[in-house]
Amino acid sequence: MPGHFEPLPGGGAAVALDDVEISIIRSLAVQLLELIGPGPGAEAPEDPLAELFAEGPSEPPADPVLRRLFPDAYSDPEQAPASPAEADEQRAHSAEFRRYTENDLRAGKRENALAVIRTLDALAPVDEGGAVLKLAPGESKQWLSALNDLRLAIGARLEITDEDDTDLLYRLPDEDPRKPMVMAYLWLGGLQETLVTTLMP
């Protein structure tokens, strides 16, 4: 179990984490929450009807991490539009889609990051330090989504765009200032991969 998730009988997953690992994941989840920001109505009394019709932003975020977390729905970075008219149409469709979906997407990502923080905060430490994290099936799915978001965020900061970039990360010298972030990126990838395996039927 150390370093990777294993399935629990009856569903869910478990992983042994030391104190440093717990601290790293929690810190990253808090940073993700701060980046995503508070939800609509966070500073005002909740009005379910107003929230139902609340519109989100129509423009992509300026921050590259947020652009990776909330990409345009109708543009393909691999394929340029055939004409300026097609580019305008893609932008219009993307703006419309973003306006009606981004608030919900942000809320979901916030809830997943909060689930990570809550489960880590509820851990009972073991005598030799660290703890065994046990997740119910629903919590496993929230963790999987949050781990994916954390890797996307770190990947954006490291300017990783494809698998070739990932291969280069393994060859970074120890003195490279990106090395700690790279190690976190690769480690979270391992956790994510083993958690996916526990959720397979």
Image (cartoon, grey):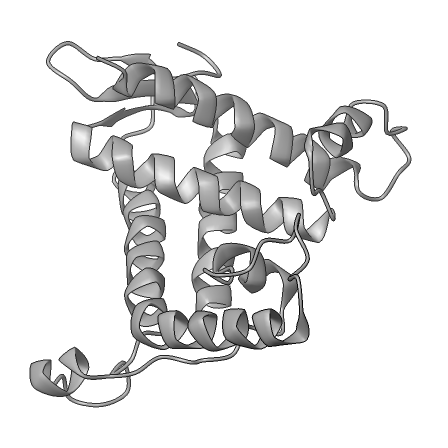
- The residue lying at 29 percent from left, 80 percent from top is 40
> Horizontally, is 133 left or right of 76 in the view?
left
Q: Quadrant of residue 111?
A: bottom left
Q: Position of residue 25 (x, y in %)?
A: 48, 40
Of residues 58 and 127, the one drawn nearer to the viewer in this rendering: 58
Q: Is residue 120 above or below residue 129?
A: below
Of residues 155 and 6, the one drawn nearer to the viewer in this rendering: 155
Q: Is residue 108 above or below residue 142?
A: below
> Horizontally, is 85 left or right of 72 in the view?
right
Q: Position of residue 115 (x, y in %)?
A: 28, 47
Q: Position of residue 114 (x, y in %)?
A: 31, 53
- The residue lying at 46 percent from left, 70 percent from top is 94
Residue 60 appears in the rendering: no
Q: Quadrant of residue 46?
A: bottom left
Q: Is residue 75 above or below residue 187?
A: below
- The residue lying at 73 percent from left, 46 percent from top is 158
Question: How many numbered badges does the structure rendering display?
Answer: 0
Where's the C terminus, which quadrant? top left
Where's the N terminus, which quadrant? top left
Of residues 74 and 182, the one drawn nearer to the viewer in this rendering: 74
Q: Position of residue 91 (x, y in %)?
A: 53, 74
- The residue lying at 29 percent from left, 57 percent from top is 108
Residue 53 appears in the rendering: yes
Q: Is residue 175 above or below residue 98?
A: above
